[in-house]
Amino acid sequence: MKQLKTIEFKKKLAQGSIVVDTRDATDFTEGFIPGSIFIGHEGNMEDWATILLSKDKSIILVTSEGKDNEVAEKFSQNGYNKIDGILEGGFESWKNAGEKIDLVIDIEPDELAMDIPFDNNLTILDVRSFEEYSKSHVKDAINLPLSEMTDVAQIADFEEHQNLYIYSENGYRSVIAASLLKKEGYYSVRNIQGGFEKIKHEKSIHLEK
């Protein structure tokens, strides 16, 4: 797999290649290349890639140290033949070159609990499946399953002033969803760490079925 220096990576990006960042979720939220789609290797990477990424478009990868070949092989085995390369030196090389970066704010469930009564622009997104949502969810949360976010521009209709708080079951899918929303220009995005599994233990957050 071709290693791309930062300047080459930028050129591919300008030509329309999609940046797929496969690092750990925590590393991604702390900083990523603007416009990147997160599909971390610690989750069901192949499944989510198949659902969310077109095999007709060129892809450039950002990986964790030592994961280049493993990630590239997984994508190739899954039918992605238009991988144009991997960022040499990973995200650190991009950051050290002084290039622009973006981030997703991570918050704990207790911070969500504190914000709910006071933030009139707060919107909670549950990106789990409809079945998971039906069993139990945060009161007033909107169900926007990640599996349906193949075209965010078509299905997401949020206002600029809205503060989007996103959760999944354990916090993996929510980071993918956050990256998709960020790519569409929604800047006020927060990821609830630990997901619903952690939220349901926060007594001050009301749940409903």
Image (spheres, rainbow, N blue to C red):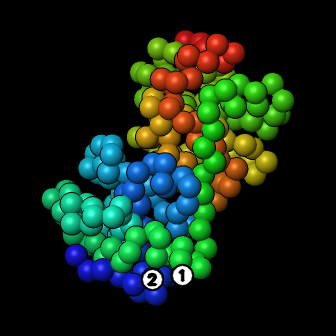
Q: Residue at x 45, y 82 (%)?
A: 6
Which numbered marker is on residue 21?
Answer: none
Tell me the quarter of the image containing the N terminus.
bottom left
Q: Residue furthest left?
A: 77
Q: Residue at x 63, y 38 (%)?
A: 107
Q: Does 63 sit above or below residue 152?
A: below
Q: Residue at x 52, y 63 (%)?
A: 32
Tell me the quarter of the image containing the C terminus.
top right
Q: Does 142 sit above or below residue 1?
A: above
Judged from the image, the secondary structure of the residue bearing numbered disc 2 is: helix
Quick one: 82 or 44, which is closer to the camera?
Answer: 44
Q: Residue at x 26, y 80 (%)?
A: 2
Residue 113 position within the rendered picture, expressed as x and y whole percent measured from the top left: 71, 25
Tag 1: amino acid? Ala
Residue with the mark numbered 1: 97
| Disc on the earlier residue, 2 or 1 | 2
Quick one: 54 or 198, which is closer to the camera?
Answer: 198
On the image, which quarter does residue 147 sit in?
Answer: top left
Which numbered marker is on residue 6?
Answer: 2
Tag 2: amino acid? Thr
